[in-house]
């Protein structure tokens, strides 16, 4: 199973209950940032973590995810 397939399964499950999913990614973790963008997540700002470092905040909404993967809305 690839990272993309795993994210798709997790998001499919999450969107049964929520309209929006948020991810926090370290600023140096460009690989994860790119992977999230590939599944349709959008940058939505930043947020401080417990150590005071600013993480990149990504979000994806059910309607955007459903349209991208052809899932029922």
Image (cartoon, rainbow, N blue to C red):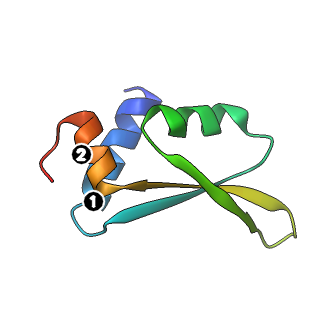
Tell me the residue that label 2 is attached to. 66
Which quadrant of the rendered structure holds the C terminus? bottom left
Frontmost residue, 44 versus 36: 44
Quadrant of residue 56 within the rendered picture? bottom right
In this view, the residue farthest toward the right is 52
Q: Left or right? Give the position of 31 relative to 70.
A: right
Real-space CA distance between mark 1 and mark 2, rounded to the nearest whole angstrom: 9 Å
Residue placed at 31% from the left, 45% from the top? Answer: 65
Q: Position of residue 25 (x, y in %)?
A: 67, 51
In this view, the residue farthest toward the left is 72
Q: Position of residue 45 (x, y in %)?
A: 67, 59
- Asked which secondary structure carries label 1, the reply is loop
**From what the image shows, is residue 55 above or below residue 28?**
below
In this view, the residue farthest toward the top is 2
Contact between labelled residues 2 and 1, with CB atoms less than 8 Å apart: yes
**From what the image shows, is residue 24 above or below residue 27?**
below
Tell me the residue that label 1 is attached to. 15
Quadrant of residue 8 within the rendered picture? top left
């Amino acid at each position: 199973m690839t990272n993309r397939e795993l994210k798709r399964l997790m998001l499919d499950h999450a969107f049964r209950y929520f309209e929006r999913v948020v991810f926090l990614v370290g600023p140096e973790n460009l690989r994860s940032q790119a992977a999230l963008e590939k599944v349709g997540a959008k940058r939505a700002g930043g947020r401080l973590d417990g150590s005071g470092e600013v993480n990149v905040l990504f979000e994806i909404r059910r309607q955007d995810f459903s349209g991208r993967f052809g899932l029922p809305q």
